[in-house]
Amino acid sequence: MDAVVDFGAFPGDVVAFGGAVSNAHAVSGMLADLALRGLAGLPMVSTGDHCAYCAEPMRTLALLRGAGMHSIAGNCEESLGAGGDDCGCGFVPGTACDLASGAWFSHAASEVDDAARAWMRGLPRLAVFRAHGRRWGVLHGGASAVNRYLWPVDPDAMLRDEIALLERAAGRVDAVLAGHCGLPFTREIDGRLWLNTGALGMPPNDGDARVSYAVIEAGAPRIIRFDYDWPGAQAAMHAAGLTQGYDRCLETGWWPSEDVLPAALRRGARRVLSD
Ligand SMILES: [Fe+2]
């Protein structure tokens, strides 16, 4: 059974995010957006995947660790930390996702140093924390698998099973903070809240270049979409030779491939999930 780390009891609001994906410009954008909203200095909890599609894994880590983030490991930390040879997303060989991931994973693997890999290996797979009277569980994709995709359209039973597995390891929770799938959404399952904040460093395939994080407040969490310097992030990708499609996504807001998406969530079948 996975070890569970307790991030502690936070006295007020908490910033939640995941999927910075080596997009240091998006991290800087989130920090600036928090400052504009008068929320600078809040505790931060991340679901991982700090280093992936974009160009600046080490600068991204420095910004996030400098901000004092608490984090679990995503599949990207597990693969990079272990010296793996792919991202661990489980893409089908030869698909567009698989081919694009080869380029960015090689780039990330060449940039991330030994100290960062050691830090990644030390991250837990599951965590808990308390905020505003709720006990939260933190996982990456699912409790059954770090790279499980759980989508906003999935049936209640699927999320219920994941919550039961999480609670077997972590004890009773009132809410779940999840990542990996890249789409921001909330669901309520048997009185428990499920929050996915979307990806901080890649837009959620809705034709809008803004990216997202969340603020856990009293009552319902607030998912925040915000503008940032995506041309800067894109220029860094081009300078690094990362031109396989995620570079265009930063501008267009559409993923380079929808292989992993359920049909109901593919282009033309959906619009913005949150604002
Ligand atoms: Fe992931």
Image (tube, rainbow, N blue to C red):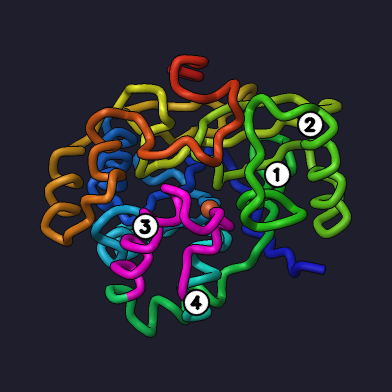
Q: Quadrant of residue 275?
A: top left
Amino acid, disc 4: Gly
Residue under label 2: 192
Residue under label 1: 136
Residue neighbourhood size for the residue with mark 3, other residues' Cα within 10 Å, grouped as few (<14), some (14–19), many (≥20): many
Where disc 4 sits, the SS reads loop
Count every numbered label the image shows and give the total.
Answer: 4
Residue occupying the point 49% across, 27% down? 223
Residue under label 3: 64
Amino acid, disc 2: Arg
Q: Nearer the viewer, residue 45 or 101?
A: 101
Residue neighbourhood size for the residue with mark 2, other residues' Cα within 10 Å, grouped as few (<14), some (14–19), many (≥20): some
Q: Nearer the viewer, residue 124 or 86?
A: 86
Left or right placement of residue 17 versus residue 171 in this view = left
Amino acid, disc 1: Trp
Is tag 1's residue or tag 4's residue first in the polypeptide sequence? 4
